[in-house]
Image (cartoon, grey):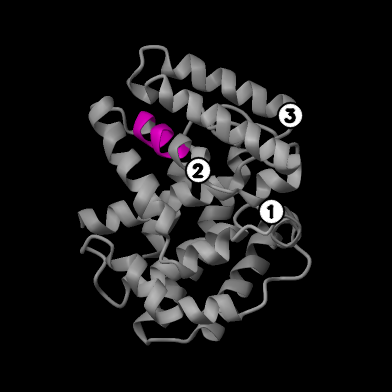
Amino acid sequence: MGACAEACLRLECETWPKPGLVSHVDAGSHGDMDAALLIRSAAVLRPFFTALAQAGEADADLPRLREIGLAAEARMMAATGGVNTHRGAIFALGLLCAAAAQGGGSRPGGLGRRVRDRWGNAILETPPPPSTHGTAALTRYGVGGARQEAASGFASAYAVGLPALRAGRVMRPGNAEAARVQCFFALLATTDDTNLLHRGGAGGLAFAQRAAQEFLAAGGVAANDWCQRATETHRQFVARRLSPGGCADLLAVCLFIDASEAA
């Protein structure tokens, strides 16, 4: 499970154009991180994802999973010099690793249902961290955020992201990166991303969702000029310092679920 989670984080980083976010091409709207830092972060997290899978196999409760997740965060911060590269991904992929170790990952919807049924109530009952940008956005704008997404069994990933990922493979056969871009834009068009709310407020979120919706309405990656249009959207996000990190985490979630179901 740890290797799969790390691979999904690497693929997320290697996806471009991905508006506002770090990739192998540029640093997007970030002045404190680049692709090399993200890859290093993903590598140091691998044994913690493995530990989360082992805890899931033992049917650990949420406090035990959270204990491992906090240790993973501490190791991430040490490896990145204090930069939060993957806190949201540790939470989401960690739950999925734990669920996958309990079986059912190959059945459509199985991982999400397992997360929802085993840990969903505990996730909602556990107070969010008090000092994060995401928590501040949750309080100010009243959105559900990553906790609600996980507690729902990753409803957005199943309803929006996975269908878009698989449709993208049909639109651009043999171009796995284009399929990931299609998935990302579909998520961006519908997700109340707390990172966008933190950086751009309600106006920034509305701008980002509208840009994604326009990209999809014009054909998404099926259009001949898809890469140019996605690149222009990326430039607009960078000019506004917008960074949809929640959608990046959901892209990695979709890749993990897809790989589990394919296996």
Q: Residue at x 66, y 23 (%)?
A: 236
Quadrant of the snapshot with the C terminus:
bottom left
Determine whether, in the image, residue 127 is placed left or right of residue 247: right
Secondary structure found at label 1 = helix
- Residue for badge 2: 190
Q: Are marks 2 and 3 in contact (CB under 8 Å)?
A: no
The answer to which of marks 1 and 2 sits earlier in the sequence is 1
Instruction: Identify the residue at the far right of this view.
Output: 131
* Amino acid tagged 1: Thr
Q: Residues within 10 Å of mark 1 (few under 14, many from 20)?
A: some
* Amino acid tagged 3: Arg
Judging depth in this view, the residue of 116 and 10 nearest the camera is 116
The answer to which of marks 3 and 1 sits earlier in the sequence is 1
153 is higher (above) or lower (below) than 173? below
Q: Are marks 3 and 1 in contact (CB under 8 Å)?
A: no
Give the percent coordinates (x, y) of residue 42: 53, 54
* Camera-nearest label, 1 or 2: 2
To which quarter of the image does residue 142 belong? bottom right
Region rendered in magenta: 178-184
- Residue for badge 3: 240
Q: Residue at x 61, y 33 (%)?
A: 208
Q: Which mark is residue 80?
A: 1
Determine whether, in the image, residue 57 is placed left or right of residue 22: left
57 is higher (above) or lower (below) than 219? below
The Cα–Cα distance between marks 1 and 2, rounded to whole angstroms, is 31 Å
